[in-house]
Amino acid sequence: MIVVLDTNIWVSAIIWGGIPDQIVSLKQLGQIEIASSQKMLNELERTFNKKKIQPKLAAIICNKTPKTCNLDPSQ
């Protein structure tokens, strides 16, 4: 099955988990294919670059790689 995930699903899957994350996991299990377009990828990039999303993404990265994480750009 081929599915299209909108930006809200990607953001929810990456930041909050839950059912959107389960949908993305289906791709990793080979149970679905995810289709996209350049326009959708551009929207996703703009969304992840928003100031209100950046701290959430940084926190996720730090939780996965705490030894190499530095959230203070002055250091």
Image (cartoon, helix red, strand yellow):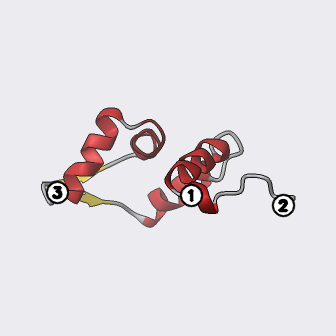
**Up-down relation of residue 45 to residue 22 (above or below):** below
Question: Is 22 or 8 nearer to us in this picture?
Answer: 22
Disc 2 marks a residue whose amino acid type is: Gln
**Alpha carbons under labels 3 and 2: distance apart:** 40 Å
Label 3 with label 2: CB-CB less than 8 Å: no
Q: Quadrant of the C terminus?
A: bottom right
Q: Position of residue 20 (x, y in %)?
A: 33, 39
* 3D distance between C-alphas at marks 3 and 1: 25 Å
Splitting the image into 4 quarters, where does residue 51 fall? top right
Q: Which residue occupies the extreme front position in the image?
A: 67
* Viewer-closest of 72 and 12: 72
* Residue 3, position as x, y percentages in the image: 23, 51
Closer mark to the observer between disc 3 and disc 1? 3
The CA distance from mark 1 to mark 2 is: 26 Å
| Element on which disc 1 rests | helix
Identity of the residue drawn at 72% across and 52% down: 71
- Provide the residue designation for mark 2: 75
- Mark 1 — residue? 45
Which label lies toward us, 1 or 2? 2
- Residue closest to the far right: 74
Question: Quick check: 11 left or right of 45?
Answer: left
Q: Secondary structure at mark 3?
A: loop
